[in-house]
Every structure is written in structure tokens, then in C-alpha cells.
Amino acid sequence: MAESAEADWVSRFADEVISEAERRAPGKPIVCASGLSPSGPIHLGNLREVMTPHLVADEIRRRGLDCVHLLSWDDYDRFRRVPAGVDPSWAEHIGKPLTSVPAPPGSPHANWAEHFKAPMTAALTELGVDYRGISQTEQYTSGAYREQILLAVRERSRIDAILAAYRTKDGGREVADYFPYKPYCELCERDLTKVTAYDDETTELAYTCECGFGETVRLAEHDRGKLVWKVDWPMRWAYEGVVFEPSGVDHHSPGSAWVVGGQIVGEVFGGEQPIGPMYAFVGITGMAKMSSSKGDVPTPADALGIMEAPVLRWLYARRKPAQSFKIAFDQEIQRLYDEWDALARKVDSGQAQPAELAAHARAVGTAAGPLPATPVPVPYRTLASILDITTGHDEQALRILRDLDAVDRLDQARPRLDRAQRWVADHLPADQRTHVRETPDQDLLDSLGQTERESLRLLADGLDDWTLDGLTSLVYGVPKLQAGLDADAKPTPELKAAQRAFFVLLYRLLVGRDTGPRLPTLLMAVGADRVRKLVGG
Ligand SMILES: [Zn+2]
């Protein structure tokens, strides 16, 4: 990594974070942070929230420094709405902490939050993200934030004044109404509560709930409530000593959590705002064609189903956080893989630029070591084409790959092979799938003229050299032979036209269309006997 230390955005942030950490808390582990809400399936777009600090923390670790990446699970947030596809009766849980809501029917997990955390946790492990997860439910209900909560409540007028500066001046609310702590109701567990009285001396807090329940508790002993979001976030910056935490563009408008948090963290909690780049939106292409049983939300697990972890890491490493980009579930993934393979060749040959080297190194491994790689990286588009034609028949796929001199065993092409398999199954549009005919197209065969019949006979007779090279020579050679040319004859416009016409004829007879995968590959997948049958041989 030494040669790339100055080269990319990750290194520059690492420099900044290290020097800032040295100023703020010398000698202590450096803290980077992310936050995720397990309120539903965690969208692939939210992965940037984790990948940005991960890459910076990883660079700091590569430099031999102690760095922790905290991942706050906002699982003590309220359950807001029942997503489509879940029993409407879950509406009775709206207002409860996410960890108090039952998991969706059929889930093996203990509660709603755990159900949605689990796939994200698995994806982060596969991506090599080394983090320390923090359940905000555990933090709040264990009283970990007791002093910070009492402090925020004591300073509620100051907080309200900070927030008021950003509020539109439509009057209405008295400053005295503002209360930064929201109790969850002791009886119904929901947050439909209103604080009706608070005594700063005794910390006695009275609340009523929409369910009719009401009680008076001592806040100094109360562990069933949380600070409101705009106070909770800066509280945690101070509590955890966060030096780096990026956030999405939606947090950066005037009066938003990031902006007011920057004031609250210093004026109330005596801490400092982290270095916090705003990261741009990550878009998804090609999901419209995806038939998903779990709704339209693409998750990191979905992306890892069709691409290897290093490729997904690379998408984040090569773009600055402020640059938006798209993750392709459509044909674009083939081009992405071409680029990735080209980069690997450049790196191997020593031709890569420093920024390319850095992004590649961050993609293929972490400070802990390399991530699993595919031993023989057969081009993704080749794999997709083979898997499309062979429709899951490992033996046929292996025969073609062997003949390409690519691999001796399918394992050598894994896990990339499995990713391409999933892509073909889930994302290759039906109208682009190759369907080899079961029976000959007798009408077409009957309509052929003498020259065409002859070309098919020559093909059927030449199927002995059952290699990709042999089949390539054959399909290009048949029109040459018919034109009375040598096998190594230079192509003329007439010959090219004859070859094109011959290829179209073969595609129509084999797959019922004018185009398809490369013919030698297609012939190999279909098999000699079936080819002979379909061309009327
Ligand atoms: Zn209640």
C-alpha cells in the first residue's frame, strides 16, 4: 500500500482522521462510525454508509494504527409502518422499539430488528468489513447513556434555542414544551407518550400515553426511552469519541440532524463533530426486471449474489464519496467485469496508475488479509453465455470451459461462476435467454434451397473435430468450401455475406432466432447429435 499512500481519497481521509484523532484523543484507538436502521430490508444504496468509514478505517489499520469502526444499529427507534407484504395486523406494533416488534411471520429471528440485521451482517462479513456492532436498544435499556440523558434534559432550553434558530418563524410552540427525551410507555411499549411534568431537582418525570396509561418515574433510573434523533446523534459522537462519520445528503440541509448536531455536540455534550463527508446517492440499474419475492428492495445480499465481494468493494473504493454511481443488475455487469479484469491485468503487469493500484488493493483485501478470489477468472460474459446455453448442466459447462483451456474443474471458476449463474437465472431478460429448439424446424428445413441444404450437410459431416477451434474453423469454412475457396482464404465482401447468411440459418435452426451466443460455443453446448438432428442431418 505504500506506493498508493498519497494516491486516493481513502488515503487523504485517513491522513486527516489520524491527525484529528491525535489532536482530540492522543493515544486512544481511532473511532470511525456508521449507523443503520433495521426498520426493514436494508437497501443496497445504504451500503455506502458502511463502506465509506470501512475503507478509511481499513487504511488506518493498514498503517498499523488501532482503529475501531462502530456500527450503530438504530434498533431502539420506533416501528413506523407496516411494509407491503407483511400482515396488516402488525400495525398494532407501530410506535414500539424495533426490538419489541415480532419478526415477520416465518422468521427464525427473535424480533423485527434482528430479522433485518441478519442478512446485512452476513453481507458485511462476506465483504470483509471489520466492525463493532452496537445495539442502541442495549445501550439505552442498560442505562449506558444515563448521564448524557440527564445532561440533555437539564440543557433542554439550550437545545431548543439551537433548534429554534433553524425553525420557520410560524410561532406556536412555547420553549418550555420542548423535551429531548421520549419515554416508551410502560404498559403498551409504544412511544405515543407526552411528558407532562419534569422536576430538575428530583428528575421526576410524569408522562401520559395515548393508550390511557400514565405514570411518574425518576429519569435518573428510567431505562425505557430515548433521546430524540437530533440530540441522540451528537450525544453519541461525544460518548463514543467519533472522529469520522459520513452521512447521506439528506442529513445536510439547514436545520438537519448533521447541522444542528454540530452545534449541540459542543454546546451541550462538550464533544466535537466528526469529520463527516457527505456521500452521494448510489443508484441501482436493472432491478425492474428482477422478480423478487421480497419486494422491490435490492439489498447488499442481492448484489453479492451476482458479483464477488472484491468487485462490489471496488465500486466504492474507486469513487470519491461525493461521486454518485450505479450498481448494475442488468447487462452492464458484464462490462463492469470486463473493466475489473482489465484492471487486474494492468496491476499484474505493473502498468496500473497509483490510484488504480490503491482501489484494486482496497477491493481484493483488507488489513486482515486477502478476500476469497476466483482462481481462474474466466470473463463474466463468457460464463454468462455458457450458463445461458447449458441451463445449469454442470457437465456441459465444464466441457466447454475445458475446451476453452480455461479450467480443468468447475471449482477453479468459482465463486465467479456461481455469481454468473445467479445473474443468468435472475436478471437475464427472458427475451434474451437462449432456448435451444427441442425439435427440428421442419417448415424451415423444407423451404431451403439446394445451396443451403448443401451447407448444412457439410456442417453435419464436419462435426468430428469437437473443439471450439475445430468448430470455429468449420462454421467459417463451410461457406468458403461452397465458394470453392481454400480454408485459409482471405475474406471478401461476398464471402462475408455468405458467412453471415449461413450463421443466421444456423441460429434459426438451433435457437429459433437470427442471433445468439457465439456459434462454436452454442454448438458445443447443444452437442453433436442434437445439432445433426436440428439441421436435418
Ligand atoms: Zn401506552
Image: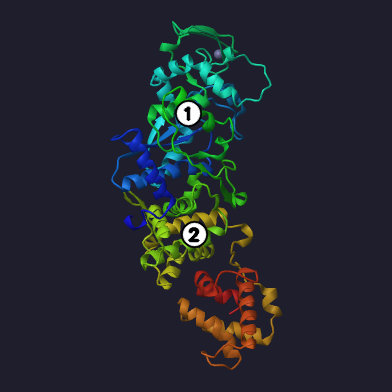
Nearer-N-terminus badge (2/1) = 1
> Where's residue 22, x and y in %?
33, 37
Residue 374 appears in the picture as rendered? yes
Q: Which residue is labeled 1 in the image?
A: 233
Q: How many marks?
A: 2
Depicted 125 relative to depicted 314: above or below: above
Which residue in the structure is indicated by mark 2?
392
Residue at the image point whose x is 53% and y is 38% from the top: 41
- Is 173 in front, or is 227? 173
Q: Nearer the viewer, mark 2 or mark 1?
A: 1
The CA distance from mark 2 to mark 1 is 49 Å
Q: In front: 12, or 455?
A: 12
For label 1, being within 8 Å of ligand 1 is answered no
Quadrant where the C terminus lies?
A: bottom right
Label 2 crowd (10 A; few <14 / some 14-19 / many >=20): some
SS at badge 2: loop
Q: Amino acid at mark 2?
A: Gly
Q: Does residue 75 appear in the picture of this structure?
A: no
Q: Give the quadrant of the N terminus.
A: bottom left
Relative image position of residue 455 (x, y in whole percent):
61, 84
Toward which corner of the image does residue 430 lie, by quadrant?
bottom right
Residue at x 61% of width, y 34% of height: 84
In x, y percent, where is residue 504?
Answer: 64, 76
Residue 245: % across, % down: 45, 37
Give the amino acid type for the residue marked by disc 1 in the picture. Trp
Instruction: From the viewer's perspective, tell me whether residue 201 is left or right of residue 446.
Output: left
